[in-house]
Amino acid sequence: MVKDTHLFREIHEQPQVLRRLLDKEAEIINRLAEEIHARQIQHVVIAARGTSDNAGRYAQYLFGAVNGLVVALATPSLFTIYKRPPSFGNSLVLGISQSGKSPDIVAVLAEARQQGVLTAALTNEPESELASNADHVIDLHAGLERSVAATKTYTSELMAIAMLSASLVNDRRMMADLQKIPEVVSETLSMEASIAEIVPRYRYMRDCVVIGRGYNYATAFEIALKLKELTYTIVEPYSSADFLHGPLAVIEHGFPVIVIAPSGDMSAEMGRFMRTLKGRQAEILVISDAAEILDLAQIRLQLPVPVPELLSPLTAVLPGQIFAMYLSAVRDYDPDKPRALRKVTETH
């Protein structure tokens, strides 16, 4: 039974996890923001893998749009394999890892610290080696995550990133919106029953694409990862713009496309993209709160509460988590034990 799994429980713990993070880490995040200002930092380098790397993609958009920071994802192989680490200059080097154990991510922060660069870690293990190499440690407060597929640690990483972004600009409205997110997440989880009903339609789906753009480019990657991990489906994530530059050729009658398109500045672009898909007879499953977007899809997962677009990845990912969990169960897989995977993956 799905409801007896660790994954089910952890998905449903997310409102409480986000509330704990908001309540307990605001002061630490404010201190990090103060040091970023004091050092006049304008660049951020993020070291992460897997789900945490997808949180880093969100940070690229959020820190860029809200804070005017140039954000790059680190290339850990330069540190561990080639032994040719770049000079970080006056940057913040941010490690994101639920376990804090992966040697390549630790190596990036260790090198940054040796260079005298400001370092910070977002981790669910504040006593980890990653944390020991960080000047500032933000505890995700997710509690023990038993399921191999990360869910609550991902949304807590997004929340920590958004809290830092709001603190850097002292945006009270954004801070107030963040305080509402745990309740919105709780309401979004009420979509579970309707998602469970449509999942059997996709029992024999062997491949699909997941499309997002802007802030939800990260969401496309994370939903695709959950589908790969839990259901062994061949899934590729794309931005809508990149998809038009070649991959559109794979679309034929009935080809499944999952589109993440909450309301916001990206709505018009995503609407045009979906009309292109319709013209090629794709089967579109959309995650959105916008009526005009929902009307363009065959399968509609309507987000119950609109949120500002820059915070929508915190809620838009939830239907994807639930969809992947139920599709795994429909295929008689164990959602807690995906084949060939372990909870902590240590790469070098």
Image (tube, rainbow, N blue to C red):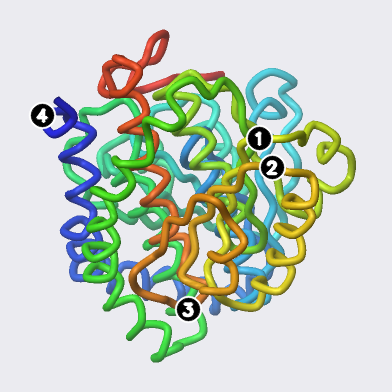
Instruction: Read off the residue under disc 4.
Output: 4
Classify 10 Å Cα crowding around label 3: few (below 14), some (14-19), many (20 and above).
Answer: some
User: Which of marks 3 and 2 precedes in the sequence?
Assistant: 2
Q: CA distance from mark 4 to mark 1?
A: 34 Å
Q: Is residue 177 above or below residue 125?
A: below
Residue 303 sits in which quadrant?
bottom left
The CA span between labels 2 and 3 is 29 Å
Relative to the observer, which residue lies in front, 234 or 33?
234
Disc 3 marks which residue? 308
Q: Secondary structure at mark 3?
A: loop
Q: CA distance from mark 1 to mark 2?
A: 5 Å
Q: Are circles 1 and 2 on residues that touch, CB within 8 Å?
A: yes
Residue type beneath disc 3: Pro
At label 2, which amino acid type do we have? Ala
Q: State the residue at coordinates (43%, 79%).
A: 167
The residue tagged 2 is 282
